[in-house]
Amino acid sequence: MKVVILAGGYGTRLSEETDLRPKPMVEIGGRPILWHIMKLYSHWGFDEFVILTGYKSHVIKDYFINYYTRYSDITVDMKNNSLEIHSHRSEPWKVTMLYTGRETMTGGRLLKAKECIGNERFMLTYGDGVSDINIPDLLDFHIKSGKTVTLTAVQPTGKYGSLKVESDNRVSSFLEKPVGDGAWINGGFFVMESKIFDYIKNGDATVLEQEPLERLAADNALVAFKHTGFWKAMDTLKDKNELTGMWVQGKAPWALWLR
């Protein structure tokens, strides 16, 4: 089954990093967040990827074209114009990169992958979010639902500490980063049937999270897989630094392949 990854946006809220590279290529512990996402899927046995590029697409292409030598031990004999690879560290991945335009919206990017995906069931996620989600459980939930699309619903932590203050001004509880207001949000990690393409009507201008998902919900064709474990999107430099801190400390909940 193919895993489609949206990796073409500008990432304007992370401009400190994205002036030079697309957001999916911003690094956590020396590896792009895109790599972390792919390692998660690969951990569960999903190794065929379709990456939908746009802004600075060449950075993503160059990374995978040079992946083999980037992570291998090599000797370059410049006199004899030869390259010797001593040991290699590669992945069992098949990666297709589709340029979908700089200004194309999420639904439009997905539509441009229709020919590559065909009539098969596939997975889709964003190129800036990591999680410890159990992908086989998600897939099983989707198949049993019989719906066109399953999205993963998450409850992100709040930005501020939460206090419970009693009438006498005594603080009876304190949570540094509580779960938000109880609302579930779209955390990506979709499973989709090819019928999704029937819901993308406005070409490049289609925002997947607007009309297509709204219509699917109205048609009773959209379900949510509730994930109560770890999930975090890298929207800002603060998010990037928090994720990097988890990785450096060996406490990255999404790194299931290291357990």
Image (tube, grey):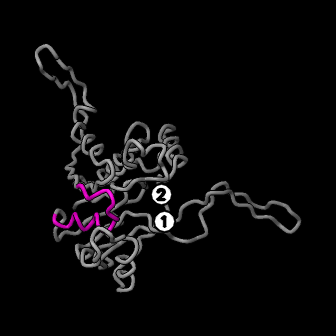
Judge whether residue 102 is colored magenta. yes
Classify 10 Å Cα crowding around label 1: few (below 14), some (14-19), many (20 and above).
many
Determine the residue positioned at 16% across, 68% down: 118
The residues tagged by marks 2 and 1 sit, at their Cα atoms, a distance apart of 7 Å
Say which quarter of the image contains residue 192: bottom left
Q: Residue furthest right?
A: 168
Determine the residue positioned at 37% across, 78% down: 211
Give how far across and how far down residue 8 sits, in percent: 33, 55
Say which quarter of the image contains residue 5: bottom left
Determine the residue positioned at 34% across, 65% down: 106
Determine the residue positioned at 41% across, 59% down: 133
Residue annotated with mark 1 = 154
> Which badge, 2 or 1, is on the more N-terminal residue?
1
| Amino acid at dot 1 | Val
Q: Between residue 91 and residue 202, name the one nearer to us.
A: 202
Judge whether residue 32 is colored magenta. no
Classify 10 Å Cα crowding around label 2: few (below 14), some (14-19), many (20 and above).
some
Instruction: Report the magenta residues as a range.
Output: 99-115
In the displayed structure image, the side of residue 32 where residue 84 appears, left or right: left
The label on residue 231 is 2
Say which quarter of the image contains residue 166: bottom right
Tell me the SS state at disc 2: strand
Q: Between residue 257 and residue 31, name the one nearer to us.
A: 31
| Amino acid at dot 2 | Trp
Q: Are marks 2 and 1 in contact (CB under 8 Å)?
A: yes
> Height in image: 195 above or below 102?
below
Q: Residue furthest bottom?
A: 219
Tell me the SS state at disc 1: strand
